[in-house]
Image (tube, rainbow, N blue to C red):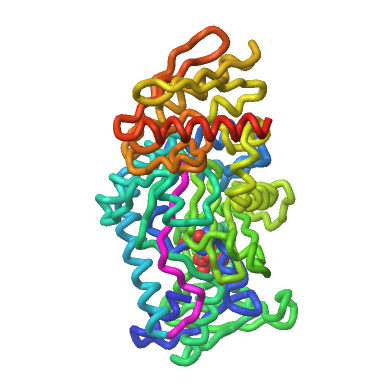
Amino acid sequence: MTTAYALLGRGYDVTVIDRQRYPAMETSFANGGQLSASNAEVWNRWATVWHGILDMTNAASPLLVNPSPSWHKYSWFAEFIAAIPRYRANTIATTAMAIRARQLLFNIAEREKIDFGLERRGILHLYNERTAFEHGLEVSRLLKEGGLERRAVTSAEMRSIEPALTHDYYGGIFTPDDATGDIHRFTRGLAAACTARGARFLQEAEVKELRHTGSRLEIALNLGPHGDIHDEQVTADGIVICAGVGSRALAAQLGDRVNIYPVKGYSITVNLPDEASQKAAPWVSLMDDTVKIVSSRLAPDQLRVAGTAEFNGYNYDIRADRIEPLVDWVRRETKDRDKEAKSTGAEGAGNLRMAHCASAVEGAKTAIKDTKEGVLVTITGPADKVAEIRARAKHTADVAKKPDATKVTHTGEGTGGGGVGRCPIVVEGDTTVDVKEIEGGVEVDVKSKKDPAALQKEAKARAANFAAAK
Ligand SMILES: Cc1cc2nc3c(=O)[nH]c(=O)nc-3n(C[C@H](O)[C@H](O)[C@H](O)COP(=O)(O)OP(=O)(O)OC[C@H]3O[C@@H](n4cnc5c(N)ncnc54)[C@H](O)[C@@H]3O)c2cc1C
């Protein structure tokens, strides 16, 4: 539709041919809603390839590849891999293009007064792990070369950017200039604007064949909801093929190679009928990097959640096991924070909640002792859990070393923010964390230069929360 609009603006007579009854009924019906430049990193990395191979049998994986052979799929994969050496240059170029496209979209919406739930509140990338966060920081440097500014934020800052966030994250990256909107409403609004500017629409018209006569193009159409009413032919001086995943077949008829391979994704739209649900849902758009799921607030009573890429050919099946991760994500991310604060411990440890807290390991015991500069946290557990306790404590020490772990303050109430916000090893403000392995677990020396007393209070309150929950 944007192409039709641009052609009208250049003075062409435009006819839009679409096999659906109305515009925007396929991919542009219900996407993730993000109008982003912050997602301009191209996928052409070895990490994506390994991920695709290793997760082939995991239905819940964000990236699922059906290995059944098809020439198109494997030739496309070969080209995907061949483009890996251009990862850097292509990411920078895509960023510049995305910034320009985003601005054009804003301009069109404003000029044509299209109401599509535009929210210019930015996009927040969420990271649960250090390696992913550090990769995000590297990507930020490339995006910057493409002209995009985004900044790293702590878990506490993330909650001030989006108060509906209920979890502690390793860190986040915020892009204030990104936005969200309902692409279906945008496209339908733009179709109305194109009609007003003189465009002709042929809906329920499937292009069957394209022929070039030397001077003109002949377009053979099947009309009707199933291409079954009658055939018709239209002619044109020129055509632009914008048929989504159908573009490859159409372009091939004219000798052009448009190597688009379909990547299927899923989205759900969550209705928020009451005040409690509206409060629990985020307004700032989120991109959860671990599970590659995005959310966008399309309206006060509507949240769009999308994700899960599937390489499975031209396949329109809707699989329950691919939608489940989206539904689970909403459940997990919108839980009541107060309730959550009291339900610390092992129950949340397996599904990203408290997944890095040593005290949350099943059967772990936590003791707090004041020191001159803070606290000594001793965490011990059953023999088969000691390795996990040590690994988590070490992870927490890594969190404390992250670049901007210094901007949050202790509340002294056991609820303060920070990388691991309910863990008795407090990672906030100016704390430093040193882990020593002892028999049966770890001894963690947590120090605060500025306010050891607040740190002591916070650590004890959190440990008491754990004891009460277990
Ligand atoms: C789950 C998911 C989430 C996404 N999230 C985002 C996001 O947050 N932000 C973002 O920017 N992008 C997102 N995308 C991508 C974005 O939605 C698509 O790139 C965009 O919608 C594609 O628009 P299009 O007009 O090219 O294709 P489509 O919207 O698919 O339109 C193509 C049209 O061509 C018609 N057509 C095809 N073949 C023929 C034929 N032979 N004859 C007649 N008509 C034909 C189709 O019927 C269709 O109407 C997402 C995609 C998915 C799947």
Q: Left or right: 407 with respect to 161?
A: left
Q: Nearer the viewer, residue 240 or 356?
A: 356
Magenta-drawn stretch contains 120: yes
Q: Left or right: 98 with respect to 60?
A: left
Residue at horizontal 72 percent and vertical 55 percent from the top: 317
Give percent across and percent down for residue 203.
Answer: 62, 81
Q: Quadrant of residue 25?
A: bottom right
Q: Nearer the viewer, residue 299 or 346?
A: 346
Q: Nearer the viewer, residue 304 or 389?
A: 389
Give percent across and percent down for residue 408.
Answer: 37, 43
Q: Left or right: 47 with respect to 267?
A: left
Is residue 159 visible to us here? Answer: yes
Q: Magenta span covers which residues?
A: 113-127
Is residue 249 visible to us here? Answer: no
Predominant secondary structure in magenta?
loop
Q: How many numbered discs, if any?
A: 0
Taking the image in four quarters, ligand 1 sits in the one at bottom right
Give percent across and percent down for residue 82.
Answer: 41, 39
The image shows residue 169, relative to residue 376, as above or below, that is below
Residue at horizontal 63 percent and vertical 41 percent from the top: 342
Q: Left or right: 132 with respect to 143?
A: right
Give percent across and percent down for residue 449.
Answer: 30, 30
Q: Specify the quadrant that holds the C terminus.
A: top right
